[in-house]
């Protein structure tokens, strides 16, 4: 397994995007070798082994959105993209094959640009999903985000991953 560079990004609420003040975004730079055969399959297998069953293969929407019903891991299996995290005026970030983003529920994200070959693997912890929200959160949406606990394992590194340190939640 590659040794990624971990970038930790914390976001406060920004416009209609609530973000997540309990858990930061984790960016795993080069978590997987980009030249690996069947990188899509390798990411799906690793996420599944660590309790994050793969849910989809696609790209990233070109509008700001967030999820209230699930934490999301995004594995960049092919191509590259420029994103913005945290809502309008948030942090711009370039990602490419082998990178992984771990987005806690409530975190705004949007694709600014991408190559035609972009393939992203998305996964959520069991019982969670990626509802697509664009409007300011209601009290019920805020409560749903707050109820989502830290998953049992890091999607990339399992029981020893950085998520367990940076998403401590008093555990």
Image (cartoon, helix red, strand yellow):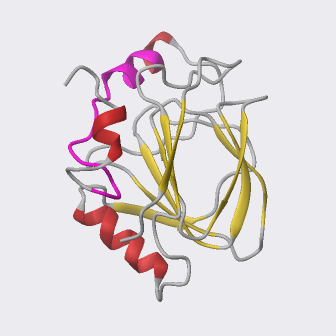
- In reply to whether residue 35 is colored magenta, the answer given is no
Q: Residue furthest top?
A: 139
- In front of the other: 2 or 127: 2
Among the 4 quarters of the image, the one containing residue 17 = top right
Q: Give the magenta-colored segment's residue range.
A: 142-157
In the rendered view, tell whether residue 130 sits above or below residue 150: below
Q: What x and y, as percent, mark residue 48?
A: 28, 64
The dominant secondary structure in magenta is: loop
Residue at 24%, 58% (x, y): give it. 50
Q: Say which quadrant the C terminus sits in.
A: top left
- Which of the pair 84/63 is nearer the observer? 84
Residue 98: image x %, image y %? 53, 69
Q: Quick one: quadrant of the N terminus?
A: bottom left
The picture places residue 44, in percent across and down from the top left corner, at 38, 70
Q: Residue at x 31, y 72 (%)?
A: 45
Residue 164 place in picture, x, y as percent: 28, 39
- Figure check: 81 above or below 144: below
Q: Residue at x 45, y 36 (%)?
A: 104
The tally of labels here is: 0
Query: With respect to residue 11, does 32 lie above or below?
Result: below
Q: Residue 70 falls in which quadrant of the image?
A: top left
Of 56 and 108, the residue lying toward us: 108
Query: Is residue 145 a member of the stretch shown in magenta?
Result: yes
> Residue at image x 51%, y 29%?
106
């Amino acid at each position: 397994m590659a040794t990624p560079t971990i970038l930790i990004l914390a976001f406060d609420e920004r416009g209609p995007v609530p973000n997540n003040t309990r858990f930061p975004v984790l960016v795993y730079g080069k978590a997987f070798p980009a030249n690996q055969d069947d990188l899509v399959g390798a990411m799906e297998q690793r996420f599944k082994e660590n309790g994050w069953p793969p849910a989809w293969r696609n790209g990233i929407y070109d509008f700001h959105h967030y999820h209230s019903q699930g934490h999301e891991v995004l594995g960049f299996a092919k191509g590259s993209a420029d994103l913005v995290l945290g809502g309008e005026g948030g942090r711009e970030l370039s990602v490419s094959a082998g990178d992984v983003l771990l987005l806690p529920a409530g975190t705004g994200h949007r694709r600014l640009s991408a190559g035609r070959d972009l393939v992203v693997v998305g996964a959520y912890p069991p019982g969670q999903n990626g509802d697509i929200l664009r409007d300011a959160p209601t009290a019920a949406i805020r409560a749903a985000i707050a109820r989502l606990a830290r998953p049992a394992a890091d999607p990339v590194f399992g029981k020893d991953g950085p998520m367990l340190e940076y998403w401590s939640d008093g555990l």
